[in-house]
Amino acid sequence: MKVEEIRVLGAEEINKRLDEAYAKLFKLRLQSATKQLTNHREIPQAKRNISRLKTILREKELGIRQVQDYGG
């Protein structure tokens, strides 16, 4: 999920997706421990997704909004 897509979500929706991301990470770790994980790069991707969600949630809590104007 991209940062722009996350920023348009509300805090409740971000928390819901964060819970889903933690569940996915748990599932991936369990698969890794039982040697059932086929793509080992999914674990760092899941961690990165959790970090994105938590960062944007914290920005919303603090009232920080990084608006990027690319100009044209």
Image (cartoon, rainbow, N blue to C red):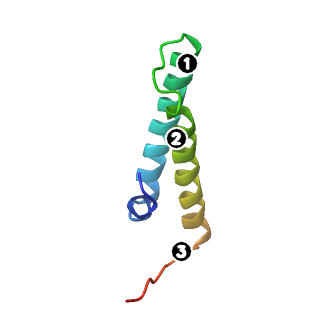
Q: Residue at x 51, y 46 (%)?
A: 49
Instruction: Give the secondary structure at mark 3.
Output: loop
User: Label 3 is placed on what type of residue?
Assistant: Arg
Residue drawn where x is 44% and y is 64% of the image:
7
- Separation (CA) of disc 1 from disc 2: 14 Å
- Badge 2: few (under 14), some or many (20 or more) residues near its Cα, within 10 Å? few
Sequence order check, earlier mark of 1 and 3: 1
Residue on which the image places disc 1:
32
Give the residue number, with chain letter if any, for mark 3: 65
Residue at 56% in and 46% down: 48
Q: Nearer the viewer, residue 68 or 39?
A: 39
Where residue 8 sits: x, y (%)? 38, 65
Q: Is residue 20 above or below residue 31?
A: below
Residue 15: give x, y in percent of width and height: 48, 48
- In terms of sequence position, does the residue under pointer 3 or pointer 2 come before the other? 2
Place of residue 20 in the rendered image (x, y in percent of width and height, measured from the top left): 44, 37
Are the residues tagged 3 and 2 within 8 Å (C-beta)? no
> In the image, which is nearer the foreground, mark 1 or mark 3?
1
* Mark 1–mark 3 distance (CA, rounded to whole Å): 37 Å
Q: Residues within 10 Å of mark 3 (few under 14, many from 20)?
A: few
Q: Tell me where residue 55 sits by quadrant.
A: bottom right
Image quadrant holding the C terminus, namely bottom left
- Amino acid type at mark 1: Ser
Dot 1 falls on a residue whose secondary structure is helix
1 or 2: tag closer to the N-terminus: 1
Residue linked to disc 2: 45
